[in-house]
Image (spheres, rainbow, N blue to C red):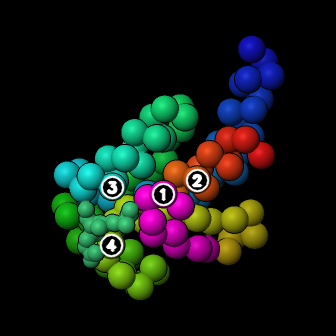
Amino acid sequence: MAKERRFLSNTKKRLKGHQLFYFATCPYCIKVRLALWWMGLKLPLKDILFRPESKADLIAGGGKKQVPCLRIEDERGGIQWMYESRDIIRYLKRQLTS
Ligand SMILES: N[C@@H](CCC(=O)N[C@@H](CS)C(=O)NCC(=O)O)C(=O)O
């Protein structure tokens, strides 16, 4: 149990600074959010339909308004924008298993 908790806490540390840009009825976003739920992970969610500032951040950072998009921040503060739901889920799984 303690091992499991440590493992999850390391994953949460690795995901610090990450954000998921989405909107509620987007099927690809639902797929990613379900995967998060299955993995027991939580990320700050940025709704691009109801929050114009989130949409603006997405376009300014990632270059297009497609969702889902995962904003990835590494330990050194480097930022990467990942757009494809399949890539995002694969990335999240890797964070759990590495
Ligand atoms: N292949 C992408 C498809 C994502 C996609 O088509 N998202 C739609 C919303 S459901 C979207 O953002 N469309 C607006 C756009 O592409 O500018 C994925 O799997 O994530």
Q: Quadrant of the N terminus?
A: top right
- Residue visible at 34% across and 53% down in the picture: 29
Q: Are marks 1 and 2 in contact (CB under 8 Å)?
A: yes
Q: Is the CB of mark 4 within 8 Å of ligand 1?
A: yes
Q: CA distance from mark 4 to mark 2?
A: 18 Å
Residue 28 disc label: 3
Amino acid at the residue labelled 1: Arg
* Marked residue nearer the N-terminal end (4 or 2): 4
Q: Which residue is mark 2?
A: 90
Task: Please report the bounds of the magenta region as a residue range.
Answer: 79-87
Amino acid at the residue labelled 3: Tyr
Q: CA distance from mark 3 to mark 4?
A: 10 Å
Q: CA distance from mark 2 to mark 3?
A: 14 Å
User: Which residue is the extreme one toward the right?
Assistant: 3
* Marked residue nearer the N-terminal end (3 or 4): 3
To which quarter of the image does residue 12 belong? Answer: top right
Q: CA distance from mark 1 to mark 2?
A: 6 Å
Asked whether 7 or 29 is in front, the reply is: 29
* Marked residue nearer the N-terminal end (1 or 4): 4
The relative height of residue 31 versus residue 18 in the rendered view (above or below) is above
Residue 86 disc label: 1
Residue 55 horizontal/vertical position (percent) = 30, 73
Residue 61 horizontal/vertical position (percent) = 46, 80
Residue 86 located left or right of residue 72 = left
Q: Which residue is mark 4?
A: 66
Amino acid at the residue labelled 2: Arg
